[in-house]
Structures are given as structure tokens and as C-alpha cells.
Image: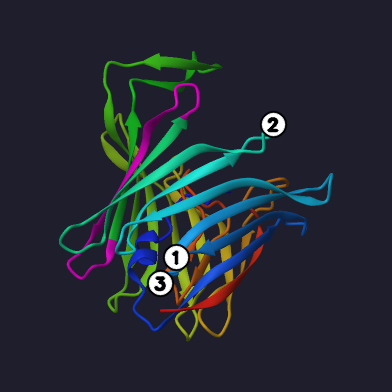
Amino acid sequence: MRKIHFILSALILTGCTQNSWWEPRTIITSDQTGQAVGRFQFTYDERGNKFTETGDTWSSETKTWLRDYRISYSYDIYGIRTGALREKRDDLTGKWVPASRIICGYSPETSRPETETHQIYHSDTSLWEDSFRDHYIHDEQGRLLYIVREKWNNGEFERDVVLRGKFLLKAHIVTPVTGWVNFIRDSFIYDQDGILTGGQVDRWNHVTGAWNPVFRYAYTYDRKGNAISETEEKWDPQSGSWSEVGQYAYTYDNHGNTIESQYIPATAVPDAEYFLVFYYNNMQSSVGYYIGDTGTFPGANGTAEYFRLKR
């Protein structure tokens, strides 16, 4: 199962208030059988800002790690992240080639993340095309309430067409309308003390013009305030009810960093693909799966190593 809700990337950008800060150095993941899946390594610049992320996949044939992708992060003169570039390794030349990028925008009043524009690279034309645009919506207390993702409609798209209820065709449809359209909304839920208790993901229905539920999740905390489990439920539009699909289990070190992440599906599915999340700095930061964006950590089990960053 793909973890499709947005991880709180806004908290990553606004949480550095302590004298020391923890950052991930290496993440290694494996599948449900314990077979290695991926290795992810991070480097940092002289300011302590994340500089690169590289991802390797395990080759069972050669018994070695094969370089898969690289993400390079950019910052302004004040150390505020301005974007990220994802590159893939060309199998023939071994060179890095652009794949996608993110352009960050901030509120001039609060300096909080306001928008992130995602673009994909077309190697045949050497041009960038808009793909997604995320809007970060906060309340008066600065808490993140929603991330609304829009999808760029370039005037053509692929759609599955069912004929007479029996035959499925993949059709290429051209439309006269171009522009940003609603796609996915992530809502965050807090208790009366301001503690994040969970959230819900909705998908935009272009026919009805309304948000339809997809799935929801809820956290369970230990006495130290660490989220030790995260239960996910999927919405069934046919029955109009929620059903549990799986649960994340997190193990922490003494500094509030997830050193082990595990996904436990409600129903075991052979060869299913899962993605992991790692929280650190007492959940003020996180790394994990974003919708088609940068870091993706496939695997059912994973471990992480951190280092203390002095600031």
C-alpha cells in the first residue's frame, strides 16, 4: 500500500528552535521477508541544511546496491529552502538526468510554507511542465490545517473508459480546458491541547464538485509524546463505512527519533508494495513518502541512523 497522505513537511521547515537538532544520516529498508529493498543516505551543507538525498536499490542478482536517484536541495541566503531537484541515473551513460523538481513559496508575513509547485522534466523537449501545486493552510495559531493539492490540466489526459459495463479501454482525451484543478486534500486533526491526533485524505470529485473521503489515520502516543503507532482506515463508498487497512509501528531512541519503522497490513498481500515514514525531533520533523515527489522509502520494515546537529 502506498502511504498517500502528505507528511508534515511544513514542520520540517519551521521547527528548529532548540540548541541541537537531529538529522537522519542513513535509512535502510527491507520487505516483509527481511530481504533488503533500499538504502537512503543524506548529506548536509555547512549550515546544517539538507544538501542531498541519494537512494539505492538492492540487486539480488549482484548482491550489491545500485544507485537509483539523487535529490539536491537549494536554499536562499537566509537558509530557507527554495526547492529540490530529483535526478535519475541513466543506465547507459551513468550520468544524472533531471526527472522532477519542486519550487517552494512562503508567506511574506509569517515566512511559513505557503505553496510548493511540482514540475516534471521532458527530456525530448528539455522543458519543465507543471504537475502539482500544494497549498499549505494554517489557522491563527499557526497549526497546519490543510494541504490542498491541485493537479495541472494541460488539455489532455488518459482515462479508463468502460463500454457497456464490460469492456475497459484506455482512451487519450483532449479537452479545451487547461489550468489548475483540485486533486487531493489532506486534513489534520488536533485535540484541545493542540496535539495532532490524526488526519484524513479526500479526493476531489469533478462530477459532483465535492471532496470524497479516501482514507483516514489516527496516532497513538507514548508518555514521552512520541507517536508509537498510526492506524489507517480506507473508505468504502459502496458500503459507506471505514475499514482498517494497516498500521505503522514506530520505535524511538532517547532523543525522540524513530529508529525503526514498520508497516503491518491488516490483510497480508504477497508482493505488495509499502512505503515507510520516520519521525524525528519529537515529531517536529519527518521523512517519508510524498505523493510523487521526492523521498520515497519503499519497504515494510526499516531502520534509521541520526546524528546531532549543533545550531
Amino acid type for the residue under numbered disc 2? Leu
For the residues labelled 3 and 1, the Cα–Cα distance comes to 17 Å
Q: Check disc 2 and report its element: helix, strand or loop.
A: loop
Amino acid type for the residue under numbered disc 1? Ala
Neighbours of disc 1 within 10 Å: few (<14), some (14-19), many (20+) = some
Q: Check disc 1 and report its element: helix, strand or loop.
A: strand
Amino acid type for the residue under numbered disc 3? Gln
For the residues labelled 1 and 2, the Cα–Cα distance comes to 45 Å
- Judge depth for marks 2 and 3 and give the one in front: 2
Q: Which residue is mark 3?
A: 284
Residue 120 image offset from top left, x and y in percent: 44, 34
Q: Earlier in the sequence, mark 3 or mark 1?
A: 1
- Judge depth for marks 3 and 1 and give the one in front: 3
Residue at the location (52% across, 83% down)? Answer: 255
Neighbours of disc 3 within 10 Å: few (<14), some (14-19), many (20+) = some
Residue at the location (57% across, 64% down)? Answer: 248
Q: Which residue is mark 1?
A: 218
- Judge depth for marks 1 and 2 and give the one in front: 2
Report the span colored magenta. Answer: 122-144
Residue 267 image offset from top left, x and y in percent: 65, 53
